[in-house]
Amino acid sequence: DSGVTQTPKHLITATGQRVTLRCSPRSGDLSVYWYQQSLDQGLQFLIQYYNGEERAKGNILERFSAQQFPDLHSELNLSSLELGDSALYFCASSVAGQPSDTQYFGPGTRLTVL
Amino acid sequence: AQSVTQLDSQVPVFEEAPVELRCNYSSSVSVYLFWYVQYPNQGLQLLLKYLSGSTLVESINGFEAEFNKSQTSFHLRKPSVHISDTAEYFCAVKRTGANNLFFGTGTRLTVIP
């Protein structure tokens, strides 16, 4: 158990809908990262937050957005969902968001778009 | 830009045999290197990492990896595998000045009894 929690574990929804994925980092970690794991794209970095501020952005679609709240939990919002958004979404956290920090991954949320 | 290549998508090996999972990376700047393991229906767990110093790094469960700068490789090895090592293994690279990890496509290790 990494100490990173993600809810829900599974999510099934329809095209065009909007969903919110939630992540609680390890106790004491200030930085949160979101990754998407799909069959065709593999594991891709989406976005990073550090202490409430956006720190780095990867291949995140404009339909997707994220935020980190004062209690350091983070939410990833996916809107206007398409079939291709079906994937496993991982959250990771690290102590200070430094490049040398280890990122600890949560168990993931499996999103299925029908 | 960074990229990671894991040439072997699947590696079957008999129990107690040695194994090597290959990882090559390309980057024009200094990098940190990582191996993560993903057991079925679980998240990724850090296996080992290279930041600096000794080029040979070890994990607590018998895996080791060697950073070879000239060959831009970070191959993962274990002298004797167990059934419990069956999992997907991901090599990842991070630019020393950045925070996001770039992952390879993964190698599925299957240990055969």
Image: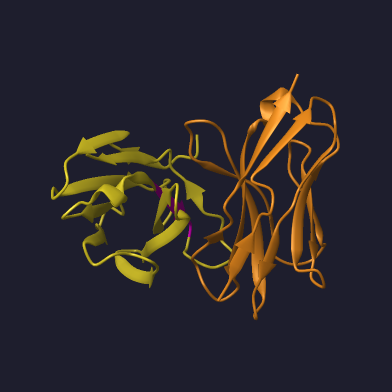
Position of residue B68 relative to residue B106, above or below, is: below
Residue A95 spot, x, y in % from top left: 48, 57
Residue closest to the eye, A73 or B62: B62
Q: Which chain corresponds to the colour yellow?
A: A
Q: Is residue A13 magenta?
A: no
Displayed quadrant of residue A86: top left
Residue B60 spot, x, y in % from top left: 74, 39
Which colour denotes chain B? orange
Residue closest to the eye, A28 or A89: A89
- At x 57% / y 52%, what residue is drawn? B105
Q: Is residue A14 left or right of residue A33?
A: left
Residue A84 visible, this angle: yes
- At x 47% / y 64%, what residue is drawn? A97
Q: Over which residues does the magenta segment extend?
A: A90-95
Magenta segment main secondary structure = strand
Tell me the quarter of the image containing the C terminus of chain A.
Answer: top left
Residue A104 spot, x, y in % from top left: 50, 48
Position of residue B87 relative to residue B47, above or below, is: above
Q: Is residue B36 left or right of residue A106?
A: right
Displayed quadrant of residue A4: top left
Residue B26 spot, x, y in % from top left: 66, 71
